[in-house]
Amino acid sequence: MQSRNLTPFDRLLSGANNALRTIAAPAAYAARPSPAENVPEAELDSRQKRHAAGLMRINHAGEVAAQALYQGHATVARDKNIEAQMQRAADEERDHLAWCEQRIGELDQAPSKLSPVWYAGAFAIGAVSGALGDKWGLGFIAETERQVCDHLDSHLQELPDTDARSRAIVAQMRDEEQEHGQHAIEAGAAQLPAPVQGLMRLTAKLMTKTAYWV
Ligand SMILES: [Fe+2]
Ligand SMILES: [Fe+2]
């Protein structure tokens, strides 16, 4: 596999390239069509539209962080199979990112202005947890995906009932995040200590509260 021969500098360049694509590029990189593709647009009033856009902006920010988390871990992963698995998950996360971005645009709003902050923070966490050893990096990913699933479930409650396009995207993301978490567990994820889990929930809360508005 090509990635076996990458030097640390190559990895750094590829990481920087991915960061730029995540933060700065328009939603052009989805490999799969959006789950909303054939779902008709609903009549939403301005309040519903603003609320749906806020929720999708949170999800977009989460996907920016997911990109960074997986890239950060892949950069330091010791096991080549795990590195490949991280890359595959990151590819699906890129679709999620593009679908969310597209949907935010349809709702006449823009993604979070703080994307570079979400990316940098999550990349550092992914690299640090991965550097502690693959089982901790995987543990971090498994716990993140679990929390993200809970959070997407809550969005399925909160989104306007009629907003079937946003719902289709969130529902498919939810199923795939569950798979990512399961794969991380099967690859040997360690269970994180409760205080770390709590800290992660707190950080996610800060991000979601902010990204709803900014
Ligand atoms: Fe995702
Ligand atoms: Fe995921």
Image (cartoon, rainbow, N blue to C red):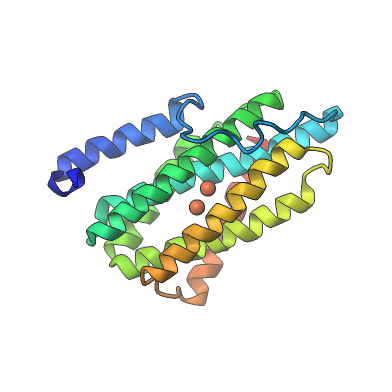
Horizontal and vertical percent position of residue 149: 61, 58
Viewer-proximal residue among 122 and 139: 139
Locate residue 128 relative to residue 192 in the image: left or right: left
Horizontal and vertical percent position of residue 206: 60, 51
Count of numbered labels shown in the rendering: 0
Question: Which residue appears at 51% of the width and 27% of the height?
Answer: 27
Asked whether the viewer can see residue 209, the reply is no
Locate residue 208 relative to residue 11 in the image: left or right: right
Question: Which residue appears at 43% of the width and 69% of the height?
Answer: 185
Q: Residue furthest front?
A: 38
Horizontal and vertical percent position of residue 174: 61, 53
Question: Which residue appears at 82% of the width and 42% of the height?
Answer: 160
Is residue 136 depicted above or below 43 in this figure?
below
Is residue 42 depicted above or below 66 in this figure?
above
Horizontal and vertical percent position of residue 112: 58, 34
Asked whether the viewer can see residue 110, the reply is yes
Question: Which residue appears at 65% of the width and 31% of the height?
Answer: 37
- Name the quadrant of the C terminus: top right
Is residue 139 depicted above or below 32 in this figure?
below
